[in-house]
Image (tube, grey):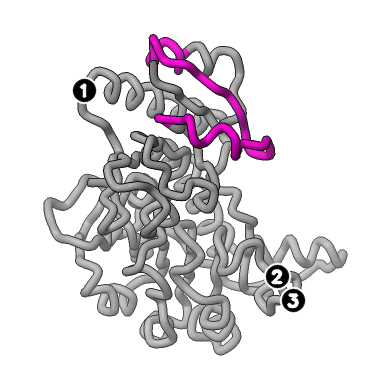
Amino acid sequence: MKTVLVYLPLEARHREKLEAAGQGCRFVYTQPGDEIDPLLPQAEIIIGNVPPAKLRAFPQLELLQLNSSGAAEYTAPGVLAAGTRLTNATGAYGRTVSEHALAVTLMLQKNLHLYRDSQRQSLWTDFGKVKSISGSVVAVVGLGDIGLRYARMAKALGAVTIGVKRRGGERPEGVDELRRTDELMDVLRRADVVASFLPGTRDTDHLYTKEHFRAMKNTAIFLNCGRGNAVSSETLAWALEQGEIAAASIDVTEPEPLPADSPLWKLDNLLITPHVSGGYHLQETFETIIDIAARNLRAYLSGGELINQVDFETGYRK
């Protein structure tokens, strides 16, 4: 009998779904904020993002199913023992994060962030010309589930979409042009909107430099709904203050939470949200996470194929 430790805030119906998938297993339920240290050495399967520092490469752990798409913290040496299989929740966040990204794209193009600021000061101010997403060149950097959904919505509104990914391949529906990451600089020069959905990996750490922002149009909008380490706070503040780009929206920062004394807070042409585009803010997201976990639990116990298995070398899905 395998012990399954579930580290998520579940309702009864979620427990029933997991237990149906893991018949014959012993389930232990806990959630963030609970004391879990005594439970970890006996867990052979874990569902949920247990803090990496608590795992200590437990040799008995066979499978860790994350409730996040990002897995970088768990692929670091010494976190998981050799042989432990790691799966993530790719596919659960596509709708909610892509819709957030589209919303802030339109907000910045229509100067709505500035009008909201004026409202707070009881000011009747006209901020002048706006842009349209129709006809805009939208570069989507990171063409996974989230990025592809965003690209398709932008294209449906009339944008010209350029997808950027690590490797080439067949151009997916909703993308007008597919380019590789090593061609990023050329793409940035053409883009009116640069939307970044990159995971946190060694290759994406501080990917966007001052040179990248210099390459962008000074009328361009930059969005980051991937991971905060893709661009340093100092570099982004410089790009916005120097007018290298027109505006930006970030749902992720480096570090998180963003310190109260960060200069980013005071920039009028920056919209900051506190990593809320994903999470469980859309109920559908959590339901999909449970579905993925149940499917992988059933597959693992029966010797079937796991979905969303993470490659420890790249940090991406295999």
Q: In which quarter of the image is residue 195?
A: bottom left
Q: Circle 1 is placed at which residue position? A: 303
**Numbered marks: total:** 3
Marks 1 and 2: in contact by CB < 8 Å? no
Region in magenta: 17-45
Q: Is residue 157 visible?
A: no
Residue 85 image offset from top left, x and y in percent: 30, 40
Residue 149 image offset from top left, x and y in percent: 36, 45
Q: Judging from the image, what secondary structure is the residue with disc 1 in?
A: loop
Residue 60 image offset from top left, x and y in percent: 38, 35
Q: Judging from the image, what secondary structure is the residue with disc 3 in?
A: loop
Q: Judging from the image, what secondary structure is the residue with disc 2 in?
A: loop
Q: How far apart are marks 3 and 1 (CA)?
A: 52 Å
Q: What residue appears at the point 25 percent right and 53 percent down from the top-left corner?
A: 175
Residue 228 image offset from top left, x and y in percent: 51, 65
Who comes first in sequence, dot 2 or dot 1? 2
Mark 1 neighbour class, 10 Å CA radius: few under 14, some 14 to 19, many 20 or more: few
Q: Circle 2 is placed at which residue position? A: 259
